[in-house]
Amino acid sequence: MRAMLLRRPKSIDERPLELVELQRPHPGPGEILIAVSACGVCHTDLHVCEGELPPHKSPVVPGHQIVGRVAELGVGVTEHALGDRVGVPWLHWTDGTCRYCRRGDENLCDNATFTGWDVDGGYAEFAVAPAAFSYPLHEKLSDLAAAPLLCAGIIGYRSLWLSGLVPWGHGREAAGGPAGAGAAAGRRLGLYGFGAAAHICLQIARYWGAEVFAFTRDEKHRRLARELGAAWAGAADEPPGGDPETKLDAAIIFAPAGELVIDALKVLDKGGTVAMGGIYSSPVPPIDYPLIYRERVIRSVTNSTRHDAAELLRLAAAIPIATETQVFPLEQANDALIALKHDGIRGAAVLQVTS
């Protein structure tokens, strides 16, 4: 099978991914083999390729937003059938027995493994994944449109919950499932960095009735934010909407830039939360205590759970979420990641592996 292989991390501008022929894998017990049709391109892939995430498997095939059809079933698989269309995200496997898994926080599992980091991912014609960590995809979602949902969408969704945008009484604790339309009416959300995750996150927040402000450097990202319903789009050091009196109820930082925490805190209302949605960030500068006084919160967002994934995929079909995609053939994975690094992607980049 064709695959884009990372032998050792280096700057993506040096084009470290090589197009190679690898042996087609076979699924073990409880696993499925997926004939990959599309794979989203994520900042996490960039961090793997450039070594900001230290190698766990080397060499490795990156990619963790996999869409395809089940081509082979491992022993004991009952969740899927041959030919089923499925999606595979970043979270590859958890042990189910550590104290985090037992309390429902499998995203914090001590022994978790991750797609495209600990095991080969979706920058290839075939990939293997545990059946229990693979998800059926709604027919409303095309392969290319579904791919960004499997990391950008899921982590954006978890970030929204952890930001506290939806007040107590409308969320999972009360309803046992996704909040409905209007659940965040009258609340204000700031999104810092406007790429794949933010453009999905914005659509969910708007469905929930929130007023959304997009903070991003590039005018093409600002245009996309406004097209998707943002009330305003501007620079990170500007007040929301250009009004110094306007305060945010919640903020999510998707750009891997720690200094944005300071910008967000400056416009955060009392009791608000800044959620850091990335797996990697540059250092956060020293914080003057008045910025976090009045019960302002800074929190990270770590991975996701299967519950997050299932809820997001249901919600994506119901809204429905429209993903903006820029498509590259498999052999141009380096080009896609270079464009991503240099803010050249409007929305999300997706590799079309097979047509």
Image (tube, rainbow, N blue to C red):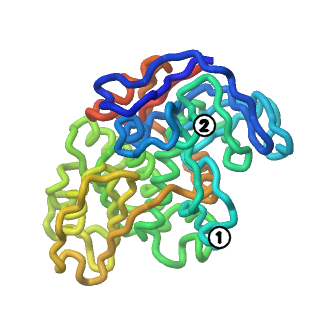
Residue type beneath disc 2: Leu
Report how far apart the C-alphas of labels 1 and 2 lie in the structure: 25 Å
Quarter of the picture containing the C terminus is top right
The one nearer the camera, 149 or 231, is 149
* Residue ID for mark 2: 141
Q: Nearer the viewer, residue 345 or 100?
A: 100
Badge 1, how many Cα within 10 Å: few under 14, some, many 20+?
few
Residue 305 position (above or below residue 30): below
**Amino acid beneath label 1:** Gly
Residue 296 image point, x, y percent: 29, 77
Residue drawn at point x = 80 percent, y = 42 percent: 29
- Tell me where residue 298 appears, x and y as whole percent: 32, 70
Residue at (21, 38) in percent of width and height: 219
Residue drawn 64% across and 31% down? 127
Residue under pointer 1:
176
* Left or right placement of residue 342 versus residue 56 in this view: left
* Element carrying mark 2: loop
SS at badge 1: loop
Picture quarter with the N terminus = top right
The picture quadrant where one finds residue 184 is: bottom left
